[in-house]
Amino acid sequence: MTDGGRLLPWAGPEGKPCYLVGDGTGYVSRLADDIEDLQLGMAGDLLGHAAELLAERRVTSAELRYLALRLTESLRDVTRVAESRGARLRAGSH
């Protein structure tokens, strides 16, 4: 992480992390907050779908592969949100 920068909930070119430097009150900060909330909500929905799918007796390998891909994407997003929020909590305690 860069000094004082907020890790944003999206990646830049070539998948590199994006950071925002500011006071946390601007448009991009609010947009990042909204996207983080959306990503967390989608992760919860996906977990519910995964539980339902895995409870089925007849699940194809294609369905499981698709589920694994979506869960991987969601976990990547949620991990980025956790890293960003954790870094901001640590920065606020200094």
Image (cartoon, rainbow, N blue to C red):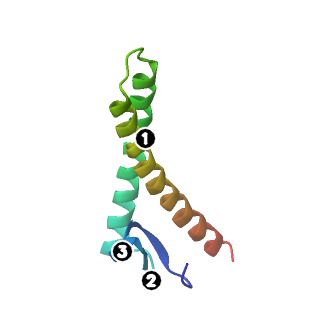
Which quadrant of the view contains residue 29? Answer: bottom left
Q: Tell me, yes or no, if residue 12 can be seen here.
A: no
Mark 3 or mark 2, which is nearer to you?
3
Q: Kindly identify which residue carries mark 2.
A: 21
Q: CA distance from mark 1 to mark 2?
A: 34 Å
Structural crowding at the residue carrying mark 2, measured as other residues with C-alpha within 10 Å and reported as few (<14), some (14–19) or many (≥20): few
Residue 39 visible in the current orientation:
yes
Q: CA distance from mark 3 to mark 2?
A: 21 Å
Residue 53 locus on image (x, y percent): 39, 24
> Where is mark 1, residue-wise?
68
Vertical side of 67 occupied by 15: above or below? below
Residue 60 in the image: above or below residue 1: above
Label 1 element class: helix
The residue at the far front in this view is: 61
Q: Are marks 3 and 1 in contact (CB under 8 Å)?
A: no
Looking at the rendering, in which quadrant would you find the C terminus?
bottom right
What residue is rendered at 39% in x and 70% in y? 15
- Say which mark, if any, is on residue 58: none
Determine which residue is flagged by label 3.
14
- What's the amino acid at mark 2? Val
* Amino acid at dot 3: Glu
- N-terminal of the pair, mark 3 or mark 1, is 3
Q: Amino acid at mark 1?
A: Ala
Q: Which residue sits at x=62%, y=73%? A: 92
Report x, y in % for residue 8: 42, 69
